[in-house]
Amino acid sequence: MTNPLLQDWDTPFEVAPFDRITDEDFAPALEVALAEHKAEIDTIAASVTEPTFDTVIGALEAAGETLDKVLGAFFTVAGADSNPKREELQRQFSPTLAAHFSDISANKALFARIADLWEKRDTLDLTDEQARVLMLTHRGFVRSGAALEGAAEDRMKEIKARLAVLGTSFTQNLLADERDWYMALSEDDLEGLPDFVVAAAHAAGAEKSVEGPVVTLSRSLIVPFLQFSPRRDLRETAFRAWEARGANGGETDNRGIAAEILTLREERAKLLGYDNFAAYKLETEMAKTPQAVRKLLMDVWEPAKAQAAADGRVLQKMMQDDGVNGDLAPWDWRYYAEKRRAVEHDLDEAALKPYFQLDRMIDAAFSCAARLFGLAFQPLDIPLYHPDCRAWEVTRDGKHVAVFVGDYFARGAKRSGAWCSAMRSQARHPEVQTPIVINVCNFAKAEPALLSYDDARTLFHEFGHALHQMLSDVTYESVSGTSVARDFVELPSQLFEHWLDQPEVLGEFAIHAETGAPMPKEMLEKVLGASTFDMGFQTVEYVASALVDLAFHDGPAPSDPMARQTEVLETIGMPDAIRMRHATPQFAHVFAGDGYSSGYYSYMWSEVMDADAFEAFKQAGGPFDPERANALETHILSTGGSRDAAELYVAFRGRLPGVEALLRGRGLAAA
């Protein structure tokens, strides 16, 4: 076999040999891997011996090793370093993979053996983790349609295949709109922009092979442009392009795709006996019901909307004082909020940004992980899929723990946003395997690489996910790392953001890029004092998106999602000058796959826990309290999905949290 995807990887820690893999290798490797996996599944299903946990569930857990390797390598590059060939392969693979896994979940012989184990589970003498894996496996098969027969079974297969195609199309349309649009800037158009924005605009122009600076739809460039450009006409042009992603008409328009996805999800839920997709989706989450989700969101919405309204009046007055008539518009909010922040907190983003060097913030995240969990990070010189990527070996007490890969810079071939994924997850069955974890971000590339404060929070956030993967200590891969309830998965990531805000962390790592001087104490105090600035805006744009997502799925699927979006926003009283964080045509969390569908609320659900969890550190010995850190690793970071999420949180904290700590943390609690 000459295909490197199908060979044993003799690379350090068996990281995919990206220097030897070509795009032509993926399709034949996938064909072999699927056939191998199918043969393994058929063997498990066809056995005539009495089913045992090891011969059924354990065998399922061990199956698909080659498939995991191929897909781990492919989806890494498909998301972070795409090209036309990889996009074509993704469109080709999506229905194939959907059909493959649909066939597994519809395998009657296999399900019969799983159901047999489930019926006699109390007599099997299982460990707690084994009992959990059996329950999740049985439930997963039932929810996938394994108990369906005849026409219903056939229709479920069709729905899954079509949803896979639509999710891929949604993502690629959004990437195309983001990749193709840019606005060229003249030297006069750069007036008023800080040096770091000018440098990022020039770098973006070079990346686009354009003479001179440009604004693109990369969040790390367009947001600071909207913050600092005094040119209202350019801000409006850029904002309207950003808002129109996925809704420009033509081949890349996502509105029809969104409508079809919602219709198919509803049909899928009803085939399984649920009233709607939200009821189906939330059954396995901590929240359990749409009513519980809506209550949480509305408990936060009202104080957030009130704060945003008060802030909007101040910004409107500032705009009028500038001689601009008319109402405050969405392309005005960030600009005047930045001016207000500079006045009220005497905080200049341009003066602040040199203190947030990318390399120093990476060091800060590593340092916090060392102090909390005893982890050490050593650079690795290994081939990766793009020159911007870098890797580290993660150890504890000299013992290998994981490989961590960072891919931090924006580029046209990378989809927007930031994410954490694992090319290989931790497990001890069928043999010990350590994780290979990737953080992907979209920071503006410049020299030196400087981050905004929000960028630095994103870095810490994604590294929190990485810690959840790296510190995982379970037997079975299906419950490893971030394989937890969707409204629990953001707890470790959002909790880790709190360490960025600690004065001792900023005091050590917020070092000026040119002078090497630490951030002055006065500036540090201003940064921390401004941490809840404009939180009304941030909370409103997020909660509005979560409420629209819930409304899409909690009831009949809307034939016109855009009309339903408008209806929801009018009902809750969405401020005119604020837009949803993710409007429907670019709401990849919800429409690129099922991950956050009817589940975008989970960031807020997790924030309720993370605010409460960090209070536990403050109430103990401080942010680096060893007892609390040990409890965090023992009960949350190492356990993955091997126990119920609510049970894990209570084990760590002694109780479930309320919303009060979140409102205090966001500065939205009543005085």
Image (spheres, grey):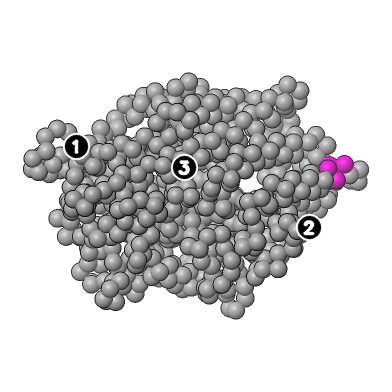
Q: Nearer the viewer, mark 2 or mark 3?
A: 2
Residue located beneath label 3 in the image: 175
Q: Position of residue 510 (x, y in %)?
A: 32, 70
Q: Residue at x 79, y 48 (%)?
A: 36
Q: Secondary structure at mark 3?
A: helix
Q: Nearer the viewer, mark 3 or mark 1?
A: 3
Q: Nearer the viewer, mark 2 or mark 1?
A: 2
Q: Position of residue 630 (x, y in %)?
A: 52, 68
Residue 182's place in the image compared with 345, above or below, is: above
Q: Could you say which disc has been placed on residue 279 in the image?
A: none
Can residue 139 be seen in the rendering of this structure? no
Q: Are marks 2 and 1 in contact (CB under 8 Å)?
A: no
Residue located beneath label 2 in the image: 1
Can residue 449 be seen in the rendering of this structure? yes
In the image: residue 153, left or right of residue 186: right
Q: Position of residue 326 (x, y in %)?
A: 14, 32
Answer few, some or many: residues within 10 Å of disc 1's Cα (few below 14, many 20 plus, some between 14 and 19).
many
Counting every numbered tag in the picture gives 3
Q: Residue at x 48, y 62 (%)?
A: 388
Q: Position of residue 460 (x, y in %)?
A: 42, 61
Q: Could you say which disc has been placed on residue 328 in the image?
A: 1
Q: Secondary structure at mark 2?
A: loop
Q: Amino acid at mark 2?
A: Met
Residue furthest bottom as drawn: 398
In the image: residue 275, left or right of residue 520: right
Answer few, some or many: residues within 10 Å of disc 3's Cα (few below 14, many 20 plus, some between 14 and 19).
many
Q: Which residues are drawn in magenta?
A: 42-46
Q: Secondary structure at mark 1?
A: loop
Q: Amino acid at mark 1?
A: Leu
**Between 520 and 586, the one nearer to me in the picture:** 586
Q: Amino acid at mark 3?
A: Leu
Q: Earlier in the sequence, mark 3 or mark 1?
A: 3
